[in-house]
Amino acid sequence: MLEELLGKSRQALREYCQGLGGPAYRGTQIYHALYAGRRFDFARMTDLPLKFRAQLSREARISLPEVLRRYASGDGSVRYLFSLAAENSRPASVEAVFMPSDGRQTVCISTQAGCAVDCRFCLTARLGLIRNLSAGEILAQVLLPLEEHKDRLAEQTNVVLMGQGEPLLNYEAVLAAVRIMLDGEGLGFSARHVTLSTSGILPGIERLAAEPIRPKLAVSLNASTDEQRDAIMPINRKYPLRALMEVCRRYPLRPWERLTFEYVLLGGVNDAPEDARRVVRLLSHLRAKVNLIPWNPADLPFSEPAPERVEEFRRILSEKGVPVFVRVSRGRDVMAACGQLASL
Ligand code: SAH
Ligand code: SF4
C-alpha cells in the first residue's frame, strides 16, 4: 500500500520522513511543496535529494481527485465535478465552485459527498450521505482550481465550506484541512477569509469554539420560528432555535469577527415582514450579520421569493441596525449556486 501524503499535517509528514530513515525537516519541505507550492509530483520537489525522491515514488503517493467535468458559467465561475475513490464499492463524486471577482477569488468546497441533514429546500439533501471526505480531498478542491487559474489569480483567496455536506458532521477531516489552509507555511490564508457554514450542529459549534485555530462561522438560520424551521430543516427538532441561539451567544468571537447568519428566502414560506422582525429579535445581543440568499431553483417544491419581499426583508433588518446583505448566487446557469450541487 502506498502512503497517501496529501492531507497530512506538517507533523505527520515529519514523522513519516523520519520513519523512512530521513531527517524530519524533509517532511517540512514536502509540506511546503504540497500546500504552498502546489507541487503534486515528487519529481518537481527539486529541493529533495534525488535518492529520497526515488524512495518516495516507491513508497508514497499524492492523489488528486480526477476532474470529471468543468462547467463554465456565463458569469465567470466554474463548477468542478470531481470523482473520488470508491469506498465500500460505492463510487462518489463531489463538487467545488471557483468564482473569480475583483481583487479576489472565492472557492466554494464540499466536505462530504451528499449530506444527511435533509433540508427540504436543498438539492444536495436528495443524495443522502454518500461518505465523508478526507482532509486531502477537501484541500484538493482548493488546490486544483487555484493551480488551474494560476496565471490569473488575484491577491486574495476566500474559501467557503458551503458546498455539499455538513462540515461539522465531518469534524476531524474538516479541521485538519482548515488548519493547513490557515497555516502560513501551508496555503497561508487568513482566518478572515475562510468561512465554515453549518446547519446548526450544536456539539460541533461548541467544539469549534474551543479551537485555537478556526475559520469564521456561518450558521444557516433559514427560519424565524421553530415551527417553520422544523418543517424545512429537520435538524431543528434535535437542535431547536433557543438552544442554537444560546450556543451562538456564548460563541467566542475574535475582536474583528461577527457571526454570519444565512437565511434562504423561500417564496411564501419564510419571507414575510413578520419573519424579518422575528429574525431581528433572535439576533439581538449578538454581534451578527445576515446574508439573505434568495432561493435558487432546483427540482423541489419551493419557489423563488418576489423581489419586493426580498427588499422589504432587507430593509427591516437594516433599519433595526442588523448588517444585512443580499447574496445573489453565482453560477445558477450551470447549477453551481447554493443548494444546487447534486453531482450531476
Ligand atoms: N451544510 C452547510 C453548508 C452547505 S449549504 C449548511 O447548510 O450551512 C450552504 C448554504 O446554502 C446554506 O446556508 C443553505 O441554507 C443554503 N442553501 C441550500 N439550498 C439552497 C437553495 N436551493 N437556494 C439557496 N440557498 C440554499
Ligand atoms: Fe446539508 Fe446544508 Fe443542504 Fe442542509 S443545506 S441538506 S445541511 S448541504
Image (cartoon, rainbow, N blue to C red):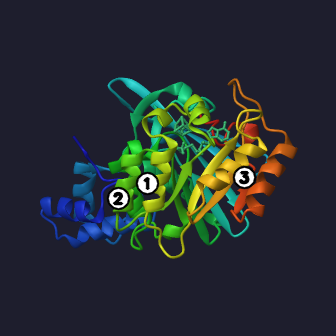
Q: Pick the residue in front: 29 or 301.
A: 301
Residue 327 numbered tag = 3
Question: To which residue does mark 1 refer?
Answer: 247
User: Which is nearer the N-term, disc 2 or disc 1?
Assistant: 2
Question: What is the spatial separation of the Cα atoms under label 2 and label 3, in whole angstroms?
Answer: 42 Å
Residue 267, position as x, y percentages in the image: 77, 34
Q: Which residue is mark 2?
A: 42
Looking at the picture, which amino acid does disc 2 mark?
A: Phe
Which quadrant of the figure shows ligand 2?
A: top right
Q: Position of residue 150 (x, y in %)?
A: 60, 63
In x, y percent, where is residue 103?
69, 70
Calculate the distance from the C-alpha at mark 2 to the C-alpha at mark 1. Answer: 45 Å
* Kind of residue indicated by mark 1: Val
Q: How many marks do you count on the picture?
A: 3
Q: Which of label 1 and label 3 is nearer to you?
A: 1
Judged by depth in the image, the label closer to the viewer, 2 or 3, is 3
